[in-house]
Structure formats: C-alpha cells, structure tokens
Amino acid sequence: MPAKVVVVGSLNMDLVTRASRLPRAGETLIGQSFSTVPGGKGANQAVASARLGAEVAMIGCVGTDAYGAQLRDALQVEGIDCQAVSTVEGSSGVALIVVDDSSQNAIVIVAGSNGELTPASLQVFDSVLQAADVIVCQLEVPMDTVGYTLKRGRELGKTVILNPAPASGPLPAEWYASIDYLIPNESEATALSGVTVDSLDSAKLAATQLIKAGAGKVIITLGAQGALFADGQGFEHLVAPKVKAVDTTAAGDTFVGGFAAALANGKVEAEAIRFGQAAAALSVTRDGAQPSIPTLHDVQGFVPS
Ligand code: RIB
C-alpha cells in the first residue's frame, strides 16, 4: 500500500495569460492567450504526490464561488482525500499569472479562502494528520496555521517538510526544530538566511545557516542548476536534467510533491531528490500548474537528453 502524504496548504484558481514578455509598471500589453487552471502551491504539491505514487490527503479551504467546487473536483479526480478541504463563505484563492515567451512567470496571489485555514480548523482534522507518514506545508496559508502544523507534526513523530514559498523574510525561529526537510528555492533561501544565494557556494553557506538555525536537512532548488542537499555532515549537488522549458509554473511544487512521495515510499534522499527533479523537468515542458504535473509512468519513461 502506498505511504500517506498529507498536504496542509493553499488551493488557488490560476488565471493565466501568455504574453511575449512580462509587462512593465504602468504598461498595457496585448496577451496571446488566457486560461483558468487549478493551482495553488498546496494543491499542486498534493496532485504531484498523488500522480507520483503516494496516497494523499489535503487539508485546506475553498470558497463558495464556482472556483471552489472546481478546485475540489480537480483533487478528487486524482484520488486525493478531500474530507478535510472545507468550504467557507466567500471567494476562493486566486493567482494572476503572466507567462512570457522565455517561460518565466510573474504571479500575484489573493488568499481568499486560504486565509480561513486556522489552527482551530486544523484541530478538527487531527485524525488526518495522525494518519500521515509525511506532512507537507508551504506559506500560502496563515503563518500561525503553518507553525501549528509543523509543531503538531513533530509531536506526532511524522516526517515534516516545509517548502517556504512564497517567503519574504526570516521564518519564526521556533519553527526550525520541527522541520525535517526545508526546501527553499534560491530567492527563498536568501530571504530566510540573509545570504544572497546566486551560486553553489552561496547556497552551501545559506544551507549551513539554516541547519544551524535548527532545520534537520535542507534542499535548495537552483532551477536549471539542479539542487543542493545539505544534511549537516556535508553537501551533495544534484544536477538537473536538461529540457526545453515552456512554462515553469509549479515546477517547484512538482519537485516537492515528487520528493515527498518518493521519501514516503522509502527512497533514500538522493534518490528522492533525483525523482523530484525528473518530475519537475517534465513539468516545465508543459503549460499550466496541475495540468503540467507528470504521472509516475511519465517519470519512469523519462530519458533526459
Ligand atoms: O507554485 C505555483 C503556484 O503558485 C501557482 O499554481 C499559483 O496558484 C501560486 O500559488
């Protein structure tokens, strides 16, 4: 039976425009296309874990608007347990996304119902946390909810993963002792550590600081440069497979969800990172958030060029 990953986090409807380039301040651009796509870092990570071999439950909130039902349905068709996805009065979370011709994006999110996921609402679903092997959090729901989840995950003896995204500054110091795997990208590692992460050496410095702060192990994702793994004993640089990117939205989420699924299913860390990297590489060759996330079958058949 597959191991259980529980994701505590956001569900957003992504309102996606493709344009030749990202607009400058005050500028109006003519876009090439528009689509609404299920996303949100939490939901994307849940979908990635489910498609990549784990049994998954999601804890989160959607609104009473039409997006709410669509976001829930998108998880249910993946076989994700949504008993702890609550519907609260008001708008669902949305993300306004522009993707340019070089596959880069700019994103503005509005929390909507994601802001209603409180520690009290989590207590109601404690049995879902209790059933987890691995618990995964990000930062698109209220900070006290993330802090509560990390602490509760530690109390229950679960493997706790924090993807500190989006991050704008340091994390509360008391969180670190509850984190088994901290998975920031370069800008998040910079915000958390104060070290500007723009090279492998600076990533090693930042990872060392984050482990000193109390994180168990740190994986800094470095985009096309791969990932740096640090466990307090040493470092490992894992090179990313090369692909032609069309849209990088949810690549980080695919990595986190894939890593969590592989770890939950007993893979050793380096193997779980490579698996997450292969999944993320495939995701950037496709448009959108959840539609871009590959299946286990896709990853097993992936031969990097
Ligand atoms: O990480 C990608 C996600 O960030 C998008 O799906 C969007 O909803 C934002 O949360």
Image: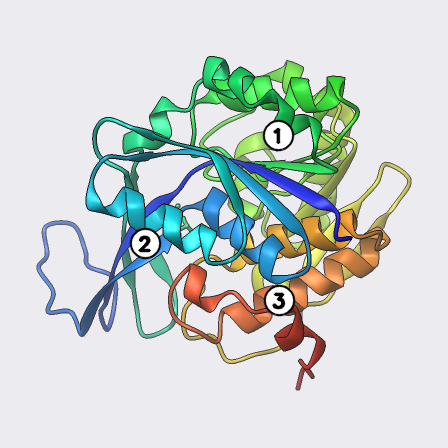
Seen from the viewer's position, the closer of residues 185 and 61 is 61
* Amino acid on which disc 1 is placed: Val
Horizontal side, residue 249 vs residue 92: left or right: right
Q: Secondary structure at mark 1?
A: helix
- Find out whether the residues at labels 2 and 1 contact each other: C-beta distance under 8 Å: no
Seen from the viewer's position, the closer of residues 103 and 212 is 103
Residue 64 sits above or below residue 294 on the image: above
* Amino acid on which disc 3 is placed: Ala
* Mark 3 crowdedness (10 Å alpha carbons): few <14, some 14-19, many ≥20: many
Which of the two discs, 2 and 3, labels the residue nearer the N terminus? 2
Q: Which quadrant holds the C terminus?
A: bottom right
Gap in angstroms between the C-alphas marked 2 and 3: 22 Å
Q: Which residue is mark 3?
A: 279
Gap in angstroms between the C-alphas marked 2 and 1: 34 Å
Q: Which residue is mark 1?
A: 128
* Amino acid on which disc 2 is placed: Ala
Dot in front, 2 or 3: 3
The residue lying at 44 percent from left, 60 percent from top is 290
Horizontal side, residue 266 vs residue 303: left or right: right
Q: Secondary structure at mark 3?
A: helix
The residue lying at 66 percent from left, 64 percent from top is 277
Q: Secondary structure at mark 2?
A: strand
Dot in front, 2 or 1: 1
Gap in angstroms between the C-alphas marked 1 and 3: 26 Å
Picture coordinates of residue 220, whole percent (x, y): 66, 48
Picture coordinates of residue 202, whole percent (x, y): 67, 46
The residue lying at 27 percent from left, 32 percent from top is 112
Residue 106 - label: 2
Residue 246 sits above or below residue 220 on the image: below
Which residue is farthest bottom?
305
- Find out whether the residues at labels 2 and 3 contact each other: C-beta distance under 8 Å: no
The residue lying at 38 percent from left, 46 percent from top is 72
